[in-house]
Amino acid sequence: MTDFTRRNLIAGASLAAAGAAAPQAEAATPPAGKQAPSVYRYRVGEFEITALYDGVWYRPIDEKFVRHADYAEVRREMSDAFMPEEKLATPFTTVLVNTGKKLILLDTGTGGQIASTAGSFSDNLKAAGIDPKTIDQIVISHFHPDHINGIKTKDNALIFPNAEIMVPEAEWKFWNDDANMRAAPEGLKIVFHNVRRIFADIAKDVTHYRPGKVVAPGIETVDAAGHTPGHAVFALQSGKEQLMVLSDTTQHPALFARHPDWQPQFDIDGAQAVATRRKLLDRAAADRTLVTGYHFPFPACGHIVKTTTGYEHVPVLWDINV
Ligand SMILES: [Zn+2]
């Protein structure tokens, strides 16, 4: 008998001896059948961060998904991370920063336009008590649909009508270049078309930034090219505290932190993405910086430790205090 079952028996025996009866419910409680709001708040100095969960997409993969890696090994690693076979769990967490002066959203979620299992961002924003009209600024890390689709509804209406939209200059140039679109493989053409759908009619209102640009006091953009040509991450600092917003430097950490050299298909320049990943994860591990990753399991923040073969993501403990 394990300690656990022995304890239960003893507890049961003492209850029976005391003549206690378990409280009886009047009626069965129906299952809720839906998730409670998925919002997590934490502080970085004076900044209040709100992590807003947008759901998960189980991305079908095949032997071509990780370049130069043995597919059996990829599947084994996914199985070890309790992911379904041949479907990469791709969660989405958007970060909202309240600097004390402004509400700044770093990427916008899927807009409910990627998978039926994602699109909870708007509901979670509402549950967090935030009106989309009060968002002052949106800073985009790169132009993949899961990061920009939340700018607009399916019918092309702006979701955050008062927000200034800031995008990486290199990203704008790459995806709006018609020659690049023509040369792109068929699967990637969709991304080029999507960029036009989101930005064509608001182009004059979009601000472009270069890496190193401080988009607001305490929020600096950092070059992280490789995943896409203009991919950016964000270094936040308030007082003595820091947060590195890793964007898509490392997709699901169970695969790409543990195997930083793996080159997933969606990294446009695989070798450059590997170099960027190693550089940023090395820095996060050495400085013991708090990090958040767009595709890390919710609430997507934690720390990075270096292992003999790669890196490990250590999630934060959920704190009821902010
Ligand atoms: Zn992404």
Image (cartoon, helix red, strand yellow):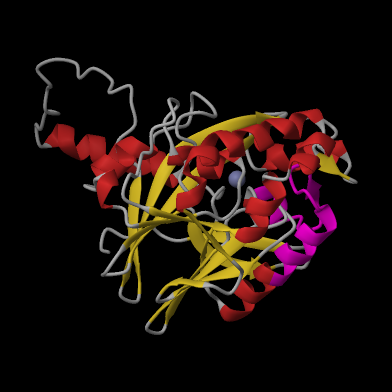
> How far across and down, in percent of the image, does residue 244 sit?
53, 68
Tell me which segment is drawn in magenta: 254-279
Q: In the image, what residue occupies the spot 50% across and 28% down? A: 113
Question: Which residue is at the far bottom?
Answer: 240
Residue 147 lies in the magenta stretch: no
Q: Is residue 20 above or below residue 7?
A: above
Say which of 249 and 192 sits in front: 192
> How far across and down, in percent of the image, does residue 52 sit?
38, 47
> How far across and down, in percent of the image, does residue 285 sit?
62, 73
Residue 271 lies in the magenta stretch: yes
**Residue 153 in view, yes or no:** yes
Q: In the image, what residue occupies the spot 74% across and 35% down? A: 188
Say which of 178 and 161 sits in front: 178
Question: Which residue is at the far front?
Answer: 204
Q: Is residue 239 above or below residue 33?
A: below
Say which of 307 and 137 sits in front: 137
Q: In the image, what residue occupies the spot 45% across and 30% down? A: 112
Q: Is residue 294 left or right of residue 111?
A: right
Q: In the image, what residue occupies the spot 45% across and 61% down? A: 316
Q: Is residue 9 above or below residue 205?
A: above
